[in-house]
Image (spheres, grey):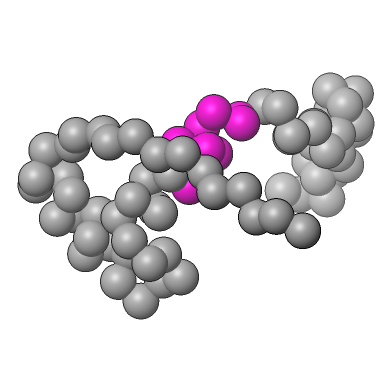
Amino acid sequence: MGFKRAKYTGISIPTPLFEKIRERIKGTGFKSVSDYIAFVLREIADHGKKRKEAFTKEDEEKIKKRLRSLGY
């Protein structure tokens, strides 16, 4: 039951950006700016891999048509 530690590298960002992120994550579940940045980069890197369209184009057109008929 071994826990494998992740390897890390350093990335430089401008200090004003670091400060802005630090303010933004106050009161969130992120423990550090590094945690937040890793989360955001993971989301970007995985974009499209896990997401599947909820509706086909045909389904989307049917929904739009129905909404228009209801006055939306």
Q: Nearer the viewer, residue 53 or 23?
A: 23
Residue 32: give x, y in percent of width and height: 33, 61
* Placement of 55 over or under 35, stated as above or below: above
Residue at 9% over, 45% down: 15
**In the visual, does 6 lie left or right of 30?**
right
Q: Which residue lies furthest to the top in this view?
A: 57
Q: Residue at x 48, y 47 (%)?
A: 39
**Does residue 25 belong to the magenta stretch?**
no
Residue under the point 9% across and 47% down = 16
Instruction: Check the image and name the residue furthest to the bottom.
Output: 27
Query: In this orientation, which residue lies closer to the viewer: 14 or 24?
Result: 14
Magenta residues, dominant SS class = helix
Q: Measured from the top left, where is residue 53 in percent x and y? A: 80, 32
Q: Quadrant of residue 69?
A: top right
Q: Where is 17 relative to 23, above or below?
A: above
Q: Tell me if residue 40 can be seen.
A: no
Residue 46 lies in the magenta-colored region: yes
Quadrant location, the N terminus = bottom right
Quadrant hosting residue 26: bottom left
| Residue sitting at x 18%, y 49% | 18
Horizontally, residue 30 falls left or right of residue 6, namely left
- For the record, the magenta segment spans 39-47
Label tally: 0
**Image location of residue 34, percent across then percent down:** 33, 50
The answer to whether one can see residue 18 in this image is: yes
Q: Nearer the viewer, residue 19 or 3?
A: 3
Q: Position of residue 30 (x, y in %)?
A: 41, 65
Would residue 35 be found to the left or right of residue 68 on screen? left
Residue in front for this viewpoint, 34 or 6:
6
